[in-house]
């Protein structure tokens, strides 16, 4: 009886919604309705109402979106007997419907995400044996030393914690290569990392052949280990001391649990954040995924494995033959297979690792290309919507995660659609200026407001559009390639611990300047057409406004591809720990103010420190987070600067033993609370109006900066041609 009432209720509500969407109204009524909905949503947002009121606001916004879809479908498509208009018009329509479908999936997933789970670190738990896998391919030994030392130092019974370095850069295949230099490098790496692991008390493991990339490496680790649980950390993902305490206990609560995933926190900015200077004050791109989307997926038991910072059940993995390796995104594919077999997952929303992002724009694009191609492979080979064993919500969640990576197609269409009218006078969107105002502008505004509702302080206005645009230029051919040949892509390791010594244009920046030039020409054409064809001014103004939005986005992208030089090779993290600083046999009271993976800055309470100690070897004594006795870390003094009543002393670590690497890891990574505090400090919502004004100012500045970088890069070329000409004379 209850089920029948529910069906009747849903049927009645659906009929009411359909009637509302298809209700014939004149243009004035539609405009008034749009204004009322926008006002209601703004009031609810201004009052910071949550819970049911949040859903009411989203429902109001959905009504405008659906009205727009109905109008767009029935009234705006060009006649089919005009193929020059109909074909691009249909492509634009399909791009818009893709955006609406992704908005619908977003509403389903994150309208009411799960709240963060409470900490489990203080609870008494069973301590199962845990194998910690750190897969590696070409990473530097120093980087690996810090990660392995941090993993070894986690708070967990020593006899139940087994840390493994899975080295795919020193395989027998590589050491026996017919290319002599490659073979010698592999042998040297093999010997160096074996010695490092011996010093750190970590197990070193390699294999005969580099087969099935990271998935094959992890599966090889499973063959040689026996722990009940498996923790996976990328080579540049160093865990905090409480990582296992916050994650392992969940496996006792649910015997069908296969995964506890935690967020990926990064101590360095990605290329957009570095070049736009937003890292310290705006949430990172990945925070929207880890702060909102993964919690929304978790609600539907669809949080998936992200390749690192996770604990998995060996029993679950063995039931599916280990880590999946058909696609180059083995993490999501593995989770899909296990969810389809009835296993469960959990997401813990607390940063418990600190890692490194690609520093250069080219590496960033390379990483995203791999993600996009891997998700397309999953869509092609696993097709989540029809995957046996998944619940309906899980199917929708996985479809959202995979379909998202089709965004280069609609982004390309949105970018060039105005040019069809401005350059070729094609009418691919049949509407007057008034209709555009009542329907399209209202839809765009409501869409932005709904995005602000869903992601709030995790994603500022227009930033998602910028990230998608800068990726689209190079991801579009990558996605097309994998669609044409889904087995072609191969796993490529993301570059780690990069730095840019000199400011320069990215080596893949040229398309962005070409696109900006075309859009700038289109702006000139807009002005001319308004003057020459005043009878079409309403449509020209609308299309020209659309082109200006694209131009603003393209201008901001010029700043993204203008790589800023960095004085420091690695990112510094603020800390505040008491220590003693020793140099030339004398000890001074000091504090550690900030640290990086390479060095630390001290505040020394002695203004009489001899400047001649620069370049000298020194030491710092401090107490590790483990609460053990005072330990000493060797370093080299690099610079001394007066800072009020104290001296700021810049130091470079000079590790001489495995213990030294553990102390560096303790300084840099042990305290997970510092990552949470850093994230919270930059999570605030500027609102739609202030955020738009801020983005406009950012775009204007970055456009000018990008053009300056372009002219600088052209100067050496002109000078070279001039020198060639003089030599010829």
Image (cartoon, rainbow, N blue to C red):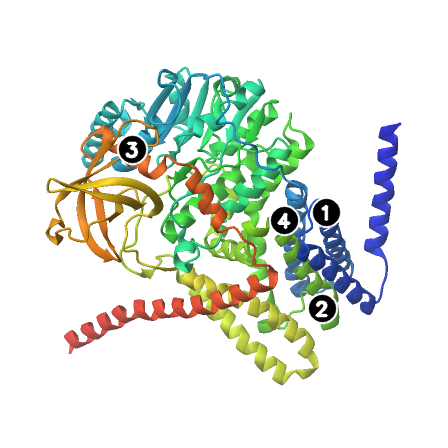
Question: Distance between the Cα atoms at labels 1 and 2?
Answer: 26 Å
601 or 331, which is in the foreground? Answer: 601
479 or 41, which is in the foreground? Answer: 41
Counting residues from the start of the chain, the first of labels 1 and 2 encountered is 1
709 or 570, which is in the foreground? Answer: 570
Give the structural element (helix, strand or loop) at label 3.
loop
Q: Nearer the viewer, mark 2 or mark 4?
A: 4
Quadrant of the image containing the C terminus: bottom left
Residue 240 x %, y %: 40, 33
Q: Which residue is mark 1?
A: 55
Name the disc covering residue 437, or none.
2
Question: Distance between the Cα atoms at labels 1 and 3?
Answer: 50 Å
- Lateral position of residue 494 relative to residue 35, left or right: left
Q: Residue 334: in sight, yes or no? A: no
Point 36% across, 52% down: residue? 360
Question: Distance between the Cα atoms at labels 4 and 3?
Answer: 43 Å
- Lateral position of residue 568 relative to residue 542, left or right: left
Q: Which residue is mark 4?
A: 454
Give the structural element (helix, strand or loop) at label 2.
helix
Point 86% across, 52% down: residue? 19
Q: Quadrant of residue 592?
A: top left
Residue 379 x %, y %: 57, 37
Dot 3: within a 10 Å radius of its alpha carbon, few (fewer than 14), some, or many (20 or more) residues?
A: some
Q: Which residue is mark 3?
A: 623
Q: Nearer the viewer, mark 4 or mark 3?
A: 3
184 vs 600: above or below: above
Dot 1: within a 10 Å radius of its alpha carbon, few (fewer than 14), some, or many (20 or more) residues?
A: some
Asked whether the residues under the numbered discs 1 and 3 touch, taking CB atoms below 8 Å apart as contact, a structural biologist would say: no
Question: Distance between the Cα atoms at labels 2 and 4?
Answer: 25 Å
């Amino acid at each position: 009886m209850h089920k029948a009432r529910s069906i009747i209720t849903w049927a009645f509500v659906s009929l009411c919604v359909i009637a509302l969407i298809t209700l014939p109204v004149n243009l004035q009524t539609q405009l008034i309705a749009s204004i009322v909905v926008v006002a209601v949503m703004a009031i609810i947002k201004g009052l910071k109402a949550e819970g049911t009121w949040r859903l009411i606001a989203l429902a109001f916004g959905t009504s405008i979106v659906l009205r727009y879809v109905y109008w767009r479908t029935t009234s705006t498509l060009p006649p089919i007997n005009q193929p020059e208009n109909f074909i691009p018009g249909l492509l634009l329509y399909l791009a818009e419907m893709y955006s609406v479908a992704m908005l619908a999936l977003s509403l389903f997933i994150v309208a009411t995400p799960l709240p963060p789970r409470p900490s489990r670190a203080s609870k008494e738990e069973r301590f199962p044996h845990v194998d910690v896998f750190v897969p590696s391919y070409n990473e530097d030994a120093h980087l690996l030393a810090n990660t392995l030392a941090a993993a070894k130092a986690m708070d967990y019974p020593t006899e139940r914690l087994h840390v493994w370095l899975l080295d795919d850069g020193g395989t027998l295949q590589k050491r026996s290569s017919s290319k002599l230099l490659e073979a010698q490098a592999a042998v040297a790496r093999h010997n160096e990392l074996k010695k490092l692991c011996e010093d750190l008390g970590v197990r070193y493991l390699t294999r005969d052949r580099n087969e099935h990339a990271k998935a094959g490496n992890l599966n090889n680790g499973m063959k040689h280990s026996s722990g009940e649980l498996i923790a996976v950390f990328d080579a540049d993902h160093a865990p905090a001391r409480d990582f296992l305490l916050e994650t392992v206990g969940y496996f006792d609560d649910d015997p069908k649990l296969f995964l506890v995933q935690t967020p990926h926190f990064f101590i360095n900015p990605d290329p957009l954040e570095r070049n736009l200077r937003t890292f310290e004050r705006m949430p990172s791109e990945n925070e929207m995924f880890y702060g909102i989307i993964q919690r929304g997926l978790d609600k539907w038991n669809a949080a998936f494995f992200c390749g690192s910072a996770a604990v998995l059940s060996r029993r679950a993995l063995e039931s599916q033959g280990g880590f999946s390796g058909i696609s180059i995104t083995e993490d999501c594919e593995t989770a899909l297979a296990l969810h389809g077999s009835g296993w469960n997952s959990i997401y813990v929303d607390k940063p418990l690792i600190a890692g490194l992002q690609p520093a250069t724009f080219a590496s960033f694009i390379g990483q995203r290309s791999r993600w996009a191609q891997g998700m397309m492979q999953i869509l092609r080979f696993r097709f989540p919507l029809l995957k046996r064993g998944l619940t309906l919500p899980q199917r929708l969640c996985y479809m959202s995660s995979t379909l998202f990576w089709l965004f280069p197609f609609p982004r390309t269409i949105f970018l060039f659609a105005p040019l069809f009218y401005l350059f070729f006078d094609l009418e691919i969107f049949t509407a007057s200026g008034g209709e555009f105002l009542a329907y399209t502008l209202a839809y765009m505004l409501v869409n932005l407001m709904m995005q602000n509702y869903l992601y709030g302080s995790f994603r500022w206005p227009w930033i998602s559009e910028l990230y998608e645009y800068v990726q689209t230029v190079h991801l579009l051919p990558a996605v097309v390639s994998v669609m044409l040949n889904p087995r072609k892509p191969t796993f490529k390791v993301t570059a780690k611990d990069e730095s840019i010594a000199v400011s320069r244009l990215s080596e893949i920046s040229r398309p962005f300047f070409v696109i900006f030039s075309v859009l700038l020409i289109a702006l000139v054409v807009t002005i001319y057409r308004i003057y020459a064809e005043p009878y079409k001014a309403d449509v020209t103004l609308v299309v020209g406004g659309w082109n200006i939005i694209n131009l603003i986005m393209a201008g901001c992208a010029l700043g993204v591809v203008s790589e800023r030089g960095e004085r420091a090779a690695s990112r510094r993290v603020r800390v505040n720990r008491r220590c003693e600083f020793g140099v030339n046999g004398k000890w001074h009271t000091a504090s550690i103010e900030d640290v990086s993976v390479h060095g630390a800055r001290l505040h020394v309470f002695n203004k009489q420190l001899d400047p001649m100690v620069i370049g000298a070897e020194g030491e710092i004594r401090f107490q590790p987070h483990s609460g053990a006795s005072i330990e000493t870390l060797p370093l080299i003094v690099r610079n001394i600067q007066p800072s009020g009543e104290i001296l700021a002393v810049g130091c470079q670590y000079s590790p001489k033993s495995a213990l030294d690497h553990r102390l560096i890891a303790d300084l840099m990574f042990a305290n997970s609370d510092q990552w949470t505090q850093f994230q919270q400090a930059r999570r605030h919502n500027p609102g739609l109006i202030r955020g738009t004004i801020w983005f406009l100012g950012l775009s204007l500045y970055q456009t000018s900066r990008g053009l300056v970088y372009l002219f600088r890069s052209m100067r050496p070329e002109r000078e070279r041609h001039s020198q060639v000409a003089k030599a010829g004379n």
